[in-house]
Image (tube, coloured by chain):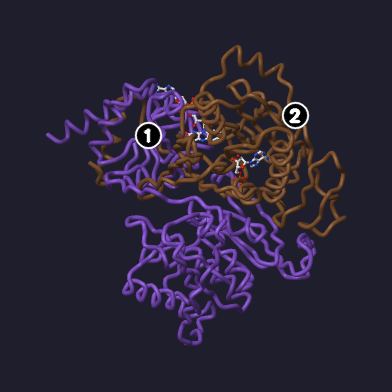
Chain colours: A brown, B purple
Amino acid sequence: MEVLVCVKRVPASGGTPQLTDDGQRVDTRNLAFTVGPHEECAVEEAIRLVAEHGGAVTVLSVGPAEADEQLRYAISMGADRGVLVETGADELDPQATAAAITGAVRRLEAERAPFDLILFGNESPDAGNYQVGVRVACALGLPIVGGIKGIDIDDGARHARLRRDVPAGVEVYEVSLPAAAAVKEGLNLPRYPSMRGRLRARKAELDELSARLPDAGAGTGAGDIDTVPSEIAIGRGGLRKMRLRQPEEKRTETVVLGRGPEAAPAIVDILEELDMV
Amino acid sequence: MLVLIEHNGEVAASSLEALTVARAIADDLGEPVEAVVFTAGTDADPSGPTLGGVSAAEEEALRSRLERLGVSAIHSVAHPELATYSPERWGESLAQLIRRVEPSAVVAAGTDRGNEIMAQAAARADLPLATNCSAVASAPPDDPGATSQNGAGAQHWRLTRVRQGGMLLEDAELAAPVALATIVPGSAEPNDDATHDSSGAARAGQPMAVEVFEPRFDDAFVASRLVERTTRDAGVSLATARVVVSGGRGVGSADGFASLEELAKLTAGAVGCSRVVTNNGWRPHSDQVGQTGTKVNPDLYIACGISGATQHWVGCMGAKAILAINTDADAPMVDRATYAVIGDVADVVPAIVDEIHRRAH
Ligand SMILES: Cc1cc2nc3c(=O)[nH]c(=O)nc-3n(C[C@H](O)[C@H](O)[C@H](O)COP(=O)(O)OP(=O)(O)OC[C@H]3O[C@@H](n4cnc5c(N)ncnc54)[C@H](O)[C@@H]3O)c2cc1C
Ligand SMILES: Nc1ncnc2c1ncn2[C@@H]1O[C@H](COP(=O)(O)O)[C@@H](O)[C@H]1O
C-alpha cells in the first residue's frame, strides 16, 4: 500500500502573531516551525496503515527549501521518504499549491508506483483554505471526504471506510481505492520520534522538485504554463493575499478574585449570580 | 448571485448569515439573490442543519421563508443520485449549476459542509474560492489595486478572510468570472426580514420562481458514498454547554481531572481541555478546545492551568466570561480573562467544590 501525506511548514508560536512591516507575512525571525496537528495525525495514520498492510509512506511538502525540516520530522516518525517541491518563500494561493502537488504526484507515480491513498490535513493551520486536498483529488480523479477521524482499509476489496464526526453524530463513507482523505486531529495519537528515527531522518536523502509561477506581470493568470522542463508547471490562481492584520480585540480588565483556595467563596458568588449552581 | 442554503426544513442559522451578507452585496450591485437548495435527498440529518430532503409541507414553509428573506428564485437541485450525501456529487451539481446560471458570485456558509461542497464546486468549475470570509465586497472596475489575474471576463472582489482560527485577518483580492466565497459563522447579524432593501423601499413583490435543476453524472463518475449515519444522544455537549470547566498542563495528570469533573457536574457543565492534555493521553481528543479541537461559546469558561496559547484562545474566545485559575499571574489566559484566581488548580478547584457543597446545606 503506497500512501502519500501532504504537509505544510507553518510557524509554531502560541503567542499573538507579529507581522512584518509590509503586512505580507507573520514575522518568523524568532519562531520555530511545525506541521499542523491534523497533518501530524495524517503522518501517524499513514505509518500505521503501512505497518499493517505493507508498502511505503511518502511525505510531500510545497514551500521553501527549509520545509525539509518538516519532511525530516515525518521521516523521524517513520515515513519512508520525503519530497520537497520548492516554490520559494512566498505562500502560494490554494489553486497554485494544489497544482504543484498534483504535478508532483503525477511525476512520482510515473517514476515509481501509483499511490493507493493520499492524505491531507482537514485545513492548513495558518491559511485554513479548506480546499487544497479537494482540488488535488479532483484533478487526479480521486474520491475525497474531509474531517476524517477513522480509516479502515479493506485490502482485498480495494476500498476504504472513512469515518467523521458531524454536529449530529457520526458519518461513515465508503470509497474505492485509490482515494484521498482530509483528516482531523483525534484520528490517532501521534508518536514521538525515536532516537534512531531522528538519526535516520538527519541522513535521509530527499527528492527535490521545483515549481514556479509565471513571472509576475508576464501572464494573464490561471491558463499560464511555465515551460522550464525540470519544473512543475503551475499557474497563478485567482485569490491574492494583499495584507495580513490583527483583528481588534476587546480587552477586558481582569478582576483578580484572590489567591489560592481563599478565593473559592468569591467564585461561587459568581456561579450563583450566573445561576449555575 | 447564488446562495447555497443548508436546511433541515428550517434555514440553518449559518446560511441565514451567508444570505444576509449576499443580500448586502447584491443590493450594492443591483442584482437579485437566488437560493440553491438540494431537494432530492431522503437522508436529511435529523438533528443538524444540513442540506437534504424535506417533506412537501416543509418545502412549502421553506419557500415562503426564503421569499421573506428576499430570495427571488430557488434553484432546486434534484437527482436520484443525490438521495444520499456525497461531497463529489453535490459539488459537481453546484459546478454544473454555475455553468448554467453564470452568476456573478456564489456564497455559502463557512461550515464544514459548506466549505466542502464549495471546494468541490470550485475545483470542478476551475474557479478560485475564498473560504471563511468575514467581509466581501465587489471592487470597482477601475480600482488600480485590482489587477487582472484571471484574464478576460474576470470580476474583481475585495474580501477579508479569517486565518489561524481567528487570530489573524487577511485582506485579499479575488479575480474570477464567478466569485466563490464562504462566510465564517458569526460575521453578520442575520437579517430575518428582507422584504425591504437597505434604503427601506419595499422590494418588487414578484412571486418567487422555483426552477428544478437536474445535474448529469456519467457512469464513470467517481464519488464517495455515505453508508452509515449514527446520531449522538443529546447530552451536555462541549459545543453547547453553558459552563465549560477546562484543564491544561497545570492539572498535572488524568487523575487531576477528578475535581474538574465534579465541578462540571455541579454546574451542569462540560469538561474541556488543552492540546497538551490530549497529547498526554489524559483526556480524549473530543474534549479538546481550540483551533484543532472544538470551538465553545459558554456563558462561563473556567480555564484551569491553561496558559492561553493563541491556538487554545481561538477556541474559547467566544465565551461570555472567562475565569482563569493559574499559578502564573502573567499567563496570557489570566491577562485576557474576566476573572482570575492566582493559585494551584489542585487547591482551588476542590475548594470551589467544597464551597458549593457547604452552601447547599
Ligand atoms: C497548529 C497548532 C494548533 C494547535 N491547536 C490547539 C488546540 O486546538 N487546542 C489547544 O489547547 N492547543 C492547541 N495547540 C497547542 C498550543 O499552542 C499550546 O501548546 C497549548 O494550548 C498549551 O496547553 P496548556 O496551556 O495546557 O500548557 P502550557 O502552555 O504548558 O501551560 C500550562 C499553564 O498551567 C499553569 N500551571 C502549571 N501548574 C499549575 C498548577 N499547579 N496550578 C495552576 N496553574 C498551573 C502554568 O502557569 C501555565 O500557564 C496548537 C498548536 C499548533 C501549533
Ligand atoms: N504548501 C503545502 N504543501 C503540502 N501540503 C499542503 C500545502 N498547503 C496545503 N497542503 C495540504 O492541504 C491541506 C489543506 O490545506 P488548506 O486548503 O490550505 O486548508 C493541508 O492540511 C495539507 O495537507
Question: What numbered label is drawn on residue B21?
Answer: none
The chain containing the residue under callout 1 comes to B
Q: If the image is split into quadrants, where does the N terminus of chain B sit? A: bottom right
In the image: residue A172, left or right of residue A46: left
Q: Measuring 78% from the left and 68% from the top, which residue is drawn there?
A: B152
Element on which disc 2 rests: strand
Examine the rendered structure and indicate whether residue B199 appears above or below residue B296: below
Percent across and percent down for residue A127 are 62, 45
Q: Measuring 39% from the left and 78% from the top, which residue is drawn there?
A: B64
Percent across and percent down for residue A41 are 52, 32
Residue position for label 2: A207
Number of numbered callouts drawn: 2
Percent across and percent down for residue B295 are 44, 44
Residue position for label 1: B246
Q: If the image is split into quadrants, where does the C terminus of chain B sit? A: top left
Q: Measuring 77% from the left and 36% from the top, which residue is drawn there?
A: A86
Q: Amino acid at mark 2?
A: Asp
Alpha-carbon span between mark 1 and mark 2: 44 Å
Crowd band around label 1 with a 10 angstrom C-alpha radius: few (<14), some (14–19), many (20+) = many
In the image: residue B12, left or right of residue A94: left
